Image (cartoon, rainbow, N blue to C red):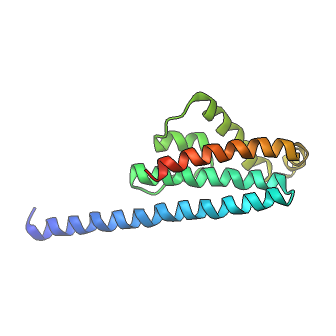
Amino acid sequence: MNRQGLLFVQQQSHLGRRVMQKHLKYWLDSAEHDFDVAESLFRNGKYDWCLFLAHLVLEKILKACYVKRKNEFPPRTHDLVRLADMAGVEMEEGVIEFLDLVNTFNISTRYPDEKFRFYALCTREFTEEQFSRIKEVRAWLLTRANA
């Protein structure tokens, strides 16, 4: 490859890194915004929507982890377990099982037949317990995304 060709490849690589850095920032900023909204929803007794958004928070942080590790756009999936695997985020089995439970928070608010059952399940106590655990996983994932 001649000098001009090499310079072009280096510029494209740098441009790609800048684009991915912006993309990483987008996922993390968006997750932080959604986390603030989820906390507000919890304070206002909108427990089903709190957990729905909390799922989205974890999804966005996992997508940030994917961008950071793979240096490419994340896959279009909402499955937290699959995202963690694709992003190469290693977790204990208990965390994986919890993410699988959190996946149901995403689905349960979308479909009418499940929505009412989920609404009834989302008492203050249930939501507080799940949201507290989501906050722990969020904090842990942020250390991976910001490393």
> Can residue 67 be seen?
yes
- Residue under the point 56% across and 64% down: 29
User: Does residue 33 lie above or below 128 as drawn?
Assistant: below
Residue 108 location, x and y as percent? 79, 47
User: Which quadrant is the N terminus positioned in?
Assistant: bottom left
- Residue under the point 9% across and 68% down: 3
Number of labels in the image equals 0
Q: Seen in the image, is 79 located left or right of residue 4? A: right
User: Does residue 19 lie above or below 73 as drawn?
Assistant: below
Residue 146 location, x and y as percent? 46, 53
Q: Nearer the viewer, residue 132 or 20?
A: 132
> Can residue 122 be seen?
no
Residue 4 location, x and y as percent? 12, 71
Which quadrant would residue 17 be assigned to in this image?
bottom left
Q: Nearer the viewer, residue 130 or 117?
A: 130
In this view, which residue lies farthest toward the left? 2
Q: Seen in the image, is 110 located left or right of residue 99? A: right
- Residue under the point 50% across and 54% down: 64
Q: Seen in the image, is 6 located left or right of residue 131? A: left
In this view, which residue lies farthest toward the top? 93
Q: Nearer the viewer, residue 146 or 51?
A: 146
User: Does residue 136 lie above or below 95 as drawn?
Assistant: below
- Residue under the point 80% across and 52% down: 109
Residue 50 location, x and y as percent? 77, 54
